[in-house]
Amino acid sequence: MEDRAIQLQLGIGAMVLSLFLLFVAIPSWVSSPSNVPNIILSPLFWPNVLAGVAGIVGAGMVLTAYWRPKPAWTEPPDVPSRPAAFARLAGVAAIMAGTMYLLPVLGMVWTAMLVFALLAFLVRTRHPIAALVCAVVVPLILYGFFAHVAGVAIPQGNYVRLP
């Protein structure tokens, strides 16, 4: 299957999933108290934002699938071998198991940093420096928002406590 067809199918799938989330799943299964003082703290806000972003990204994928010029000839993709794919799958499973072990020991922020970096290198990112920077910065920013702005307690580890 060519890239345009894959991109078109993924875009349509993202838009359908977004509509399902916005009109069926979130209203039916996410409950929210009526007296939430700040809309950002409402349990409905972030699922709706993520569903909306998924719909926008899906629409963008559909549009770019139509605007992309059709290639005259393409080389076959470099497909990794099955053992390598299963090894990566086993690596992801090991990272997940390690995450569950490390969460109570290191805390959520430090574990998230480690897991982000490990997954980036497991999938062999083309941008390792950006991945390492994001692995450190994103969990710290999220911690700062949830702990200091939203007032939500983030699990801390046994060794290093964040302010």
Image: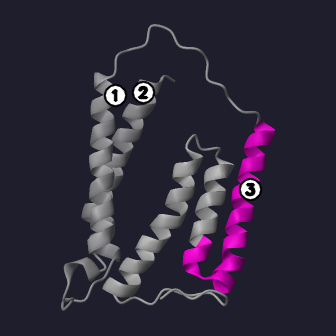
Check the image and report above or below for 70 versus 50: above
| Separation of residues labelled 3 and 1 (CA atoms) | 33 Å
Q: Which residue is mark 1?
A: 65
Q: Secondary structure at mark 2?
A: helix
In the image, residue 73 lies at what x, y percent? 50, 9
Q: Which residue is mark 2?
A: 5
Q: Please, what is the dominant secondary structure of the magenta stretch?
A: helix
**Kind of residue indicated by mark 3:** Gly
Q: Residue at x 69, y 78 (%)?
A: 102
| Separation of residues labelled 1 and 2 (CA atoms) | 7 Å
Residue 49 lies in quadrant: bottom left
Q: Classify residue 17 as left or right of residue 108.
A: left
Q: Which residue is mark 3?
A: 91
**Kind of residue indicated by mark 1:** Ala
State if disc 2 and disc 1 touch (CB < 8 Å).
yes
Q: Is residue 84 magenta?
A: yes
Is 6 or 95 nearer to us in this picture?
95
Characterize the local packing of mark 2: few (<14), some (14-19) or many (20 or more) Cα atoms within 10 angstroms.
few
Q: Residue at x 63, y 67 (%)?
A: 114
Marks 3, 2: nearer the viewer: 3
Q: Which residues are magenta?
A: 82-111
Q: Classify residue 47 as left or right of residue 82.
A: left
